[in-house]
Amino acid sequence: MITRGVYSATCSILNNDYSLNVDATIAHAASTINNGLHGAIFFGSTGQSQLISISEKKDLIAKIANHKLKKQFFLGTGSNSLKETIDLIKYGFEYGFKDFLIMPPAYYKGNTDEGVFNFYSLIISKIPKVKIILYNFELLSGYKFSVEAVTKLVKAFPNNIIGCKDSTSNLYENLKLPNFLIFPGTEKKLLKGLELGNSGIISAICNVTASLARKVFDDFENKKEQKHNDKLIAVRDVFDGYNLISALHSYMSVKDDNFKNLLPPLTLLNSTEKKELISKLDNLKFVIKNNLAA
């Protein structure tokens, strides 16, 4: 079960034919855990989940079920389809996965509190033992969770709605619920969030800041002086100047060709942007270890 800590919204790695490279995707997630993360979440927005077929997602789920890091692997669903979301969760349950990061359906405008409540209610009615981390990302879903909407869901389903990834950043300062996990979606809010009683972060950039983010988390937990937070925030600021998925894959592809493919309409940074990104990170003396690990 997901607990306090620092987690990546892990990347999906693609073959040259744009199919999911299951083994490389798992190996990358494992490497970030080996570099310090408490866990990795597959098939979030950073993992291009909306663009990956459900059959490929099932292939990965079946493969990670026997991995030595299984207890540190978690799943998103990344589907606008209620039926596919339920189907994927049920499939995950068959392999022992019960915690899911779930964003409300995107694409159609006009998501309402009532409609979003019904979406989660229907999932829970079909899978009564599911544990859900709400995914608050207005930029992608077109819907922003309010404190009141989250509170209503938790009150209705206290055994199911266990936390929230707050990429919109309107909840982490104001939502106060007992035994409820709150994860801002950016390194910029890791330390501040912890000071407010948050649980850690779930972040795209933790794909490369794993060891740095873990140092900030551990220093807070151990009541030590913070020596790494400024650099962590500075690195995040650099990546925030670009599309995060494009920037991550462009940066990591310098050391590893596995990251050079993205599913359309996503693209890598152009050559000028890539040089600029690398230069800014070099100026911060920021480097990452080899990405992939067995």
Image (cartoon, rainbow, N blue to C red):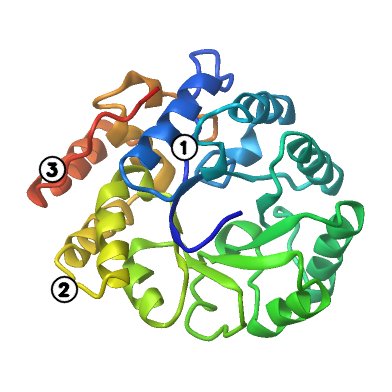
Q: Where is mark 1, residue-wise?
A: 11
Q: CA distance from mark 3 to mark 1?
A: 23 Å
Label 3 packing within 10 angstroms: few (<14), some (14-19), many (20+): few
Q: Amino acid at mark 2?
A: Glu
Label 3 secondary element: helix
> Looking at the rendered structure, which numbered label has been put on residue 279?
3
Residue at 91 percent across and 52 percent down: it is 126
Residue in view at x 56 percent, y 37 percent: 70
Name the quadrant containing residue 64: top right
Of tags 3 and 1, the one toward the viewer is 1
Is 77 displayed left or right of 239 in the figure?
right
- Residue type of the residue flagged with mark 3: Ser
Quarter occupied by the N terminus: bottom right
**Marks 3 and 1, the one that precedes in the sequence:** 1
Circle 2 is placed at which residue position? Answer: 225
Instruction: Kindly report which numbered mark, 3 or 2, lies closer to the viewer in this rendering.
Output: 2
At mark 1, the secondary structure is loop
User: Closer to the N terminus: mark 1 or mark 2?
Assistant: 1
Q: Is residue 14 above or below residue 138?
A: above
Work out whether 45 lies above or below 178.
above
Residue 243 appears in view: no
Above/below status of 51 relative to 38: above
Residue 139 visible in the displayed image: yes
Q: Is residue 133 above or below residue 95?
A: below
Give the mark nearest the N terminus, 3 or 2. 2
Crowdedness near tag 1: few (<14), some (14–19) or many (≥20) residues, C-alpha within 10 Å: many
Left or right: residue 159 versus residue 32 is right
* SS category of the residue bearing label 2: loop
Q: CA distance from mark 3 to mark 2?
A: 29 Å
